[in-house]
Amino acid sequence: MRRLIIIIGLFVLLITSGFGQAHIDARGLGLCNAYTVTSRGISAVGYNPANLGHNEDLTVSADLFDFKMSAFNNFMSLALFNKYFTGDRNGDPFDWEAEMYGETMTHKEYFLSLIPSDGFAFGLGMSIPILNVSLGNYAFSSGLEYYQRNSLPRGLFELMLEGNQVGQSLSLAFSQDVLLVTNFGFSFAIPFEKYNVGATIKYLAGIGFAGVDSSGGAFSTQATGLESNGFYRYTRAIGGNGLAVDLGFNTRKIGDWQYGIAINNIIGFINWGNDDNYIAKNIKLIESLVPVRNLLQIPDSAFSASTLHTMNLESVNVTGALANSDSLFQLRAEDIATPDSIRMNYPAIFRMGTSYQYKEDFILMADLSVGLDDYYFADRNWRLALAAEWIRFKMIPVRSGLAFGGPYGREASLGTGVHLIWFDADIALKFLGGMSFATAQGIEFGINFQFKR
């Protein structure tokens, strides 16, 4: 049990580094991403480029400093961790076999029921804009996006808590995705009398990616011994050329109301693993700063690699293990061929939103969004976000929002800032998978300083 506590504790520490998605500034984070209509200037890039057409609200803007990080797992919260892994009131180990108060299941059965069938997922990521400037209806943007997501099979936790029961088969399928991409974008909006349309064209320079593109097999205990046929294929590549296009539309104010629609990455792809791209041609300079090939285990002369890992056990018992302990686990790693070029589609997201402004007191916002793909930062579950921004004292705005659905189920956010004549400073915190710090399964933090005029 102590080993399980240590493993889960390490995972909780690891995931506090973030979980990546499309870039959003601290104001949008404080509004729980209900940003399809209200984003302005350089903040509109990546959300709804049509909002650049509202240059009567903001003519020039530039990011002076902008940073976002987030963290998420799919079942562990601080409250759950404190309940089961910090002991009882006297500090003694928790009794996992005891029945829950008023229930017919034990605490161990309840804990296992919280782990999704596809396993324990956790991730980390970061978004760092490099140079972002908007002037009138036009904007130039660049930044670095890092994304990582891992999952461990549910069977691993069943094995730790219940042991290897005879005849029970435990799945060994797991996943890993790592993505590091720089992007350079040009955005513009075309204003009309009653509405704006806009677009962003982005060049995606892929630095590297790694992923388990196939895994499976099972571990079981039979009367004759332990058996396993687990496998996973691990593919890596550096140097990617890609393109992405965002489209947006919004209305001018209709009374106190405004509406907008956007599709991010309606066209989006990266071709990996060849030498005909910016990153590959400058790989020596990049590796003088970060040893990308070494980190991804790619040979010096190659731009991609794929390895098939297998773990085979067949009727392994105590007698056989003592007689020949060297062959107890038949672990093999075999390098296999990879295509000359690996094409990756960049996830697309559809958004629509509305806002209502009451005089100079507050703005109410609502956004409905869904991923057209189901990987990386996109999710095919619909997400509804509701937010409010109190603007009566323009120097110190206060923001808050709630969201339901999407990849996290429930979200809540808080944000504020200091707005001077030509300078804005904003900060925000969002809870993922829960409505408070104790019940949340992740957090997202953002801070940015912006020049505006």
Image: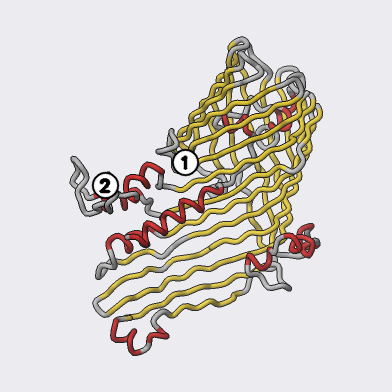
Instruction: Give the colouring mode of the picture.
Output: secondary structure
User: Which residue is identified by label 2?
Assistant: 90
Q: Quadrant of the N terminus?
A: bottom left
Give percent across and percent down for residue 185: 76, 42
Q: Amino acid at mark 1?
A: Tyr
Please say whether residue 121 is visible from this viewpoint. Answer: yes
- Quick check: 254 left or right of 285? left
- Quick check: 43 left or right of 408? right
Task: Give residue 58's quadrant in the image.
Answer: top right
Checking the image for residue 408, the label placed there is: 1
- In the rendered image, the residue lying farthest to the front is 90
Earlier residue among tags 2 and 1: 2
Q: Amino acid at mark 2?
A: Asn
Q: Nearer the viewer, mark 2 or mark 1?
A: 2
Please say whether residue 276 is visible from this viewpoint. Answer: no
Q: Residue at x 47, y 41 (%)?
A: 408
- Element at label 1: loop
Above or below: residue 235 compared with residue 415: below
